[in-house]
């Protein structure tokens, strides 16, 4: 039998890892682990890549969802009910996201936010179309375009150095909550929660057909700009040119 001696440093590292895992489990259960009382909660689902190559974008989006939920509930919720978000990992996988989508449907969510990658989001859209469930994708762009590159320009609908008052307040709140600067995934996920909340308010119900109709008619100012969906259900919003140089993000052109 082989014996391994564990140093104090190794033990501290192992303890830290266990704490992180326990905290992650607690967070996901807080966000939503079971079907809630429909008389007290309005529940939406989210499918994001929380593991894998796109996990950084998924985790930033998760932060945006959480921040928006807390603000909306602090302001009174939606239709006098608390807003809850059940978040599941889609792994960035086209087949797995369909399984996770079915899990969310079993929990009775009113709408879904997700995913990040375009191909994975398309698989979700095909599955959800059969059920007529409202779906908003925060980003649906391919992260591999800029993966590994040291100096690159890309277009985005949000910049953390935007001087708009609401955008600046979001950046401050996000940084204070998560100790990191928000990128487009964070802002788009945050805005998606507010759009769904507004659609539910305008519809006056969580009926999926009414939410979809309300989304089609929605026109509102969010931190990514003024949102209005066109005839193809694509939103119009601000466009920034972001430069990544030396690992740092900055607005190159608005």
Image (spheres, helix red, strand yellow):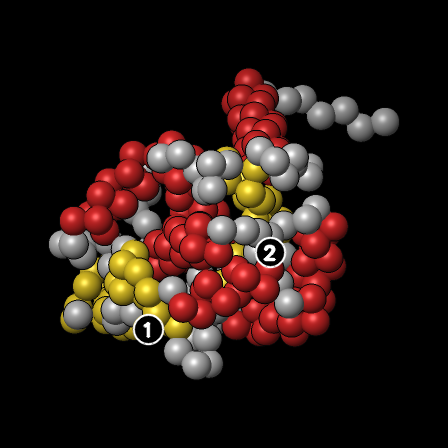
Question: In the image, which disc is placed on residue 75?
Answer: none
Q: Is residue 94 left or right of residue 41?
A: right
Q: Give the answer, above or below, for where 42 lies relative to 96.
A: above
Q: Nearer the viewer, residue 210 or 54?
A: 210
Query: Which label lies toward us, 1 or 2?
Result: 2
Q: Which residue is label 2 attached to?
A: 207
The crowding category of the residue bearing disc 1, from other C-alpha atoms within 10 Å (few below 14, some 14 to 19, many at least 20), is some
For label 1, the residue is 236
Q: Count every numbered label the image shows and give the total.
A: 2
Q: Position of residue 127 (x, y in %)?
A: 68, 69
Q: Judge by depth and name the residue closer to the eye, 142 or 105.
A: 105
User: Between marks 1 and 2, how big is the CA–CA gap?
Assistant: 25 Å
* Mark 1 or mark 2: whose residue is earlier in sequence: 2
The spot of residue 163 in percent (x, y) is 14, 54
In the image, what residue occupies the spot 76% across and 24% down?
A: 3
Q: In the figure, is residue 143 to the left or right of 171?
A: right
Residue for point 49% across, 51% down: 204
Q: Quadrant of the N terminus?
A: top right
Instruction: Decide if residue 168 is in sight here.
Output: yes
Q: Residue furthest bottom?
A: 231
Q: Quadrant of residue 31?
A: top right
The location of residue 201, given as percent across then percent down, is 44, 50
């Amino acid at each position: 039998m082989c014996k391994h001696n564990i140093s104090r440093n190794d033990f501290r590292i192992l303890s830290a890892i266990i704490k992180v895992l326990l905290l992650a489990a607690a967070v996901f259960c807080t966000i939503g682990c079971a079907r809630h009382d429909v008389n007290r909660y309005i529940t939406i689902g989210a499918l994001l890549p929380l593991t894998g190559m796109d996990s950084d974008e998924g985790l930033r989006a998760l932060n945006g969802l959480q921040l928006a939920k807390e603000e909306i509930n602090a302001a009174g919720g939606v239709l006098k009910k608390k807003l809850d978000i059940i978040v599941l990992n889609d792994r960035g996988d086209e087949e797995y996201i369909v399984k996770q989508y079915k899990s969310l449907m079993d929990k009775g969510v009113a709408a879904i936010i997700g995913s990040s990658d375009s191909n994975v989001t398309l698989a979700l859209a095909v599955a959800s179309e059969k059920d007529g469930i409202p779906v908003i994708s925060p980003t649906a762009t391919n992260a591999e375009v800029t993966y590994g590159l040291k100096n690159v320009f890309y277009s985005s609908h949000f910049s953390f150095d935007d001087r708009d008052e609401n955008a600046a307040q979001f950046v401050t709140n996000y940084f204070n909550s998560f100790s990191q600067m928000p990128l487009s995934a964070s802002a788009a996920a945050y805005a998606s929660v507010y759009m769904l909340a507004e659609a539910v308010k305008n519809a006056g119900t969580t009926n999926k057909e009414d939410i979809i109709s309300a989304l089609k008619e929605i026109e509102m100012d969010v931190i990514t700009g003024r949102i209005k969906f066109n005839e193809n259900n694509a939103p119009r919003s601000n466009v920034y040119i972001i430069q990544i140089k030396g690992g740092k993000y900055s607005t190159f052109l608005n």
